[in-house]
Amino acid sequence: MSALLILFVCLGLGALSARYAHPPAGIVQGINWWVLNIALPALVLALIPQVHFDRHTWFPVATMWLTFFGSWLLFGLLGPRLGWSRQRTGGMILVCGLGNTSFMGYPMLEAMHGQPGLVLAVVADQLGCFPLLAVGGIVVASLYAGQQPRLGAVVRRVLTFPAFLALLVGLVVNVLGGWPEAVQQTLLPIGKTLTPLALFSVGLQLSLRPQAGQWGALCAGLGWKLLLAPLLSLGLGIACGIGGLSLTAGVLQAAMAPMISAAILADQYELDPAMANTVLGFGILLSLLTVPLGNHWLPGG
């Protein structure tokens, strides 16, 4: 309960600070730099060597792929029929296909399922969601912005991302039997700074100002991201005989709010960023209720 309370406190502090405390310019960029380049790689280095890969480990990764490509299929077909612009369609595919599996997924899985939940959250994020953002996200953004995806840029983006490099090192250390205790106890506290700082950053950026004409897309997008995608993931898991924490972690990561980086990508490629940020803000708040509620009905909840 105390870990879950931290989520609300840090998120609330960020929102209140943005409204009343007049934080310095560039604070969000500074926090996000630390989270992405220091805290996240440290956490990956600390946790990936602890992963015990078994016949169920693939499932949390598969739910990320199901969520992304399901979003692409759904909104690629639905958008034109609802009269959405090509830019809105592309933006909705991004923010509703990529989940906030690190900034929110890590702390929420840890709060509800402890260290084992956190380890599976990292697996889903680093082996599932991150490659989809780095490759699939760039392809979708380029196509719907009318550009040609550049293979070299995509490969460079993946190979120079600190968390990806940490993932490769962590997998090698996993095979070799793990870190010495002194290294593990150094990496883990640095990685633990991700939770409060990431959620504070999310709170600073919350946007809840839907404009006329956005409500239909907002409901469709969050209906997929917070309800249909996790239900389909649950059906896939049951059909494949997945159970226990692997099933729960995979479904909950599929149910996470839209990814902040996906909204940033939509903004960079001019894919209706106002719509993307509206879906992001409402998705974050609603997921603080829907994810714990879903967890209650899943194994081990």
Image (spheres, rainbow, N blue to C red):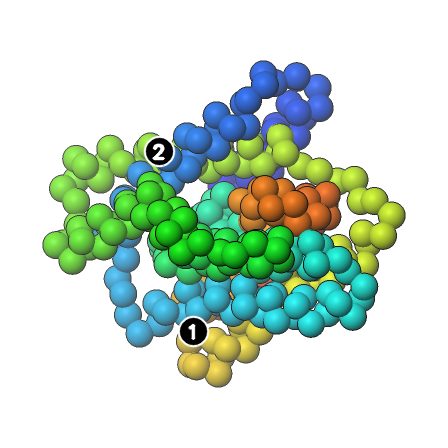
The secondary element bearing badge 1 is classed as: loop
207 or 80: nearer the viewer = 80
Mark 2–mark 1 Cα distance, whole angstroms, equals 34 Å
Q: Is residue 219 visible?
A: no
Query: Circle 2 is placed at which residue position?
Result: 38
Q: Position of residue 70 (x, y in %)?
A: 58, 70
Q: At 50% across and 77% down in the image, what residue appears?
A: 236
Q: Is residue 145 visible?
A: yes
Nearest the camera: 177 or 219? 219
- The residue positioned farthest toward the right in the image shown: 212
Label 1 sits on residue: 243
Residue 157 in the image: state x and y as whole percent.
Answer: 39, 46
Q: Amino acid at mark 2?
A: Ile
Labels 2 & 1 near each other (Cβ < 8 A): no
Q: Position of residue 293 (x, y in %)?
A: 62, 58
**Quadrant in which residue 128 is drawn:** bottom left
Residue 162 placement, left or right of 300: left
Instruction: Give the side of residue 114 with respect to residue 148, left or right.
Output: left
Q: Nearer the viewer, mark 2 or mark 1?
A: 2
Of helix, strand and loop, which one carries label 2?
A: helix
The residue nearer to you, when weighing 170 against 70, is 70
